[in-house]
Image (tube, rainbow, N blue to C red):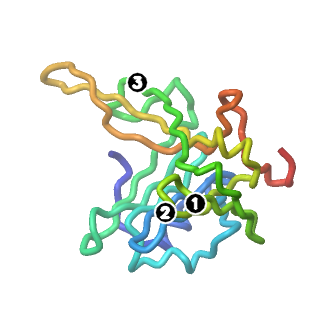
């Protein structure tokens, strides 16, 4: 995977200081968190090291990932940096493709916006979660997570496989790449 090293949540947040504008996505044993990066709607204290399974801090150029398979394991870390664009692929990667994954949002339920600017939405199965996008139903219908899949080849056979993936951003897919998140100055 590249760039793997041991660290905790505090060190991970320090490593992510090179991501000036982006998002954070965390999977904990008790909740899922999605927020702006740098943090706007959540506090660092909400990312309890005893409950975190995975944290991704990402934007269009790179993704920092802190992860572990279960609570008894040490954290691993990896960085995927595409800031050189198509000219430089990570080592061992032959190609990549981007995919848009629609967020599971029940648009028949009215979203609620909290003071921090996060929007609480309901999933079609009834659960609820926060997303860092404006509480506009039209935008929520088209809210997507853009994911980049990296393709490598088995040396023995030459067959291609997806060797890794990373998050790139949260967008509005109505007009393909139109972003539906707020800019840092408060405008669209």
Left or right relative to 149: residue 109: right
Q: Residue at x 37, y 61 (%)?
A: 67
Q: Residue at x 35, y 46 (%)?
A: 2
Q: For mark 3, what is the residue?
A: 95
Which sits in the foreground, 85 or 50? 50
Q: For mark 1, what is the residue?
A: 34
Q: Which numbered disc covers residue 26?
A: 2
State the image coordinates of residue 95 (x, y, percent, origin top left).
40, 24
Mark 3 or mark 2, which is nearer to you? 2
User: In this rendering, is residue 57 above or below 176?
Assistant: below
The answer for how far apart the CA atoms under marks 3 and 1 are is 28 Å
Quadrant location of the N terminus in the rendered image: top left
Q: Are marks 3 and 1 in contact (CB under 8 Å)?
A: no
The answer for how far apart the CA atoms under marks 3 and 2 are is 27 Å
State the image coordinates of residue 61 (x, y, percent, origin top left).
58, 40
Q: Residue at x 71, y 39 (%)?
A: 179
- Crowding around mark 1 (Cα neighbors within 10 Å: few <14, some 14 to 19, many 20+) is many
Number of numbered discs: 3
Which secondary structure lies at badge 2?
Answer: strand
Which secondary structure lies at badge 3?
Answer: strand
């Amino acid at each position: 995977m590249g760039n793997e090293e041991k660290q905790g949540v505090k060190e991970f947040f320090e490593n992510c200081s090179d991501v000036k504008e982006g998002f954070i996505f965390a999977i904990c044993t008790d909740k899922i968190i999605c927020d702006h990066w740098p943090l706007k709607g959540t506090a660092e204290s909400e990312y309890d090291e005893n409950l975190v399974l995975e944290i991704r801090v990402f934007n269009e150029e790179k993704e920092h990932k802190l992860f572990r398979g279960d609570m008894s394991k040490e954290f691993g870390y990896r960085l995927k940096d595409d800031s050189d664009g198509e000219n430089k692929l990570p080592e061992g990667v032959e190609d990549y493709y981007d995919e848009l994954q629609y967020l599971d949002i029940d648009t028949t339920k009215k979203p609620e916006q909290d003071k921090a600017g996060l929007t609480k939405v309901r999933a079609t199965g009834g659960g609820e979660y926060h997303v860092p996008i404006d509480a506009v139903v039209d935008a929520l219908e088209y809210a997507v997570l853009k994911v980049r899949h990296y393709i490598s080849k088995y040396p023995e056979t030459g067959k291609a496989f997806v060797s890794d993936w990373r998050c790139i951003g949260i967008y509005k897919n109505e007009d393909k790449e139109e972003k539906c998140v707020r800019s840092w100055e408060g405008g669209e």
